Image (cartoon, helix red, strand yellow):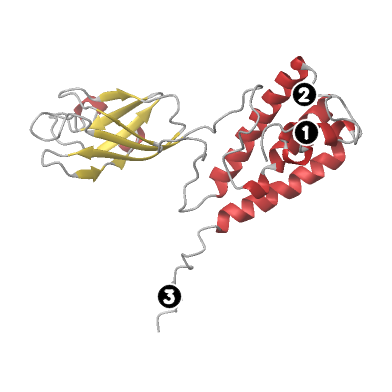
Amino acid sequence: MVFSDTVNQENGLIQDCEFALFGDNGYGQITNNSNRLKAFTGLINRALDRVVNMIWQSDGRWQFDDINFTDLPIGTTSLVSGQQDYALSVSHLKVLRVEVLDASGNWYKLKPMDENDIKNIGMADFLENGGKPLYYDIQGNSIFLYSTPLTGYVTLSNGLKIYYQRAPSYFASTDTTKTPGFTSTFHRLVSRMASYDYASIRTLEVADALGKEVLGLSNDLKDFFATRQSDEGPALRPEPRPWN
């Protein structure tokens, strides 16, 4: 479904909201009111957040990313010799993997850690001599490398790579043909969530029916994304047996 289609109403998210809330004669109740259109754009974007969160919670080894983006969710930045911490972009909602480019030009994976893992010494003394980073710790909007990278141990230019998950690509009230960036069979969940939120705030009678529909579609979405990596069969595990 596209964001808005005033000709083929069954294909538009906004038009689906109009139909769900205002009935057969409701088309135009949102599109012909600029303030209401902006309000529903916000409701749809909040619904988009919730849908993407459900996808993240259900996704397995096939990591989701909004198909509206033209780049990959992989960021690179240069290392500075002797600098331990590096700022994370606000778009990095969840860090999946961190790699460093060694002095020979080969990427290697860092292990995640937390300051609570270091028990008997201060953080300033943990791998204090610097050299080749082996671990990373995320604090706020910064990533800390242990050891601190030094010239001769790593490649500084574009030597830090971060794989991450980001927020969805949001709609503007002026959009028309843009679509939600996930499987098309679940696009209606976005418009029905937005309609439910509006109906609940306005205490409309249709709220209960919309809530039940949202629940059913949400469960279907979770089931789909939990099993979409179908070419990977279940792992075979030996059955434990008691010792004789």
Residue 238 bears which disc, if any? 3
**What residue is drawn where x is 92% and y is 34%?**
205
**What residue is drawn where x is 45% and y is 28%?**
91
Q: Is residue 154 left or right of residue 186?
A: left
Q: Nearer the viewer, residue 179 or 231?
A: 179
Q: Nearer the viewer, residue 85 or 178?
A: 178
Q: Determine which quarter of the picture holds residue 126.
A: top left
The residue lying furthest to the front in this view is: 7
Q: Secondary structure at mark 3?
A: loop
Q: Residues within 10 Å of mark 1 (few under 14, many from 20)?
A: many
**Marks 3, 1: nearer the viewer:** 1
Q: Residues within 10 Å of mark 3 (few under 14, many from 20)?
A: few
Instruction: Determine the CA span between mark 2 and mark 1.
Output: 8 Å
Q: Nearer the viewer, residue 217 or 179?
A: 179
Q: Secondary structure at mark 1?
A: helix
From where the camera sits, is residue 119 visible?
A: no
Residue 31 bears which disc, if any? 2
From where the camera sits, is residue 48 visible?
A: yes
Query: Tag 1 or tag 3, which sits nearer the N-term?
Result: 1
**Marks 3, 2: nearer the viewer:** 2
Q: Determine which quarter of the picture holds residue 117.
A: top left
The residue lying furthest to the left in this view is: 152
The reply to whether the C-beta atoms of the residues labelled 2 and 1 are less than 8 Å apart is yes
Looking at numbered disc 2 in the image, what kind of residue is underneath it?
Thr
Q: Estimate the x, y position of residue 26 in percent, counting from the top left.
A: 88, 30
Looking at numbered disc 1 in the image, what kind of residue is underneath it?
Gln
Disc 1 designates what residue? 15
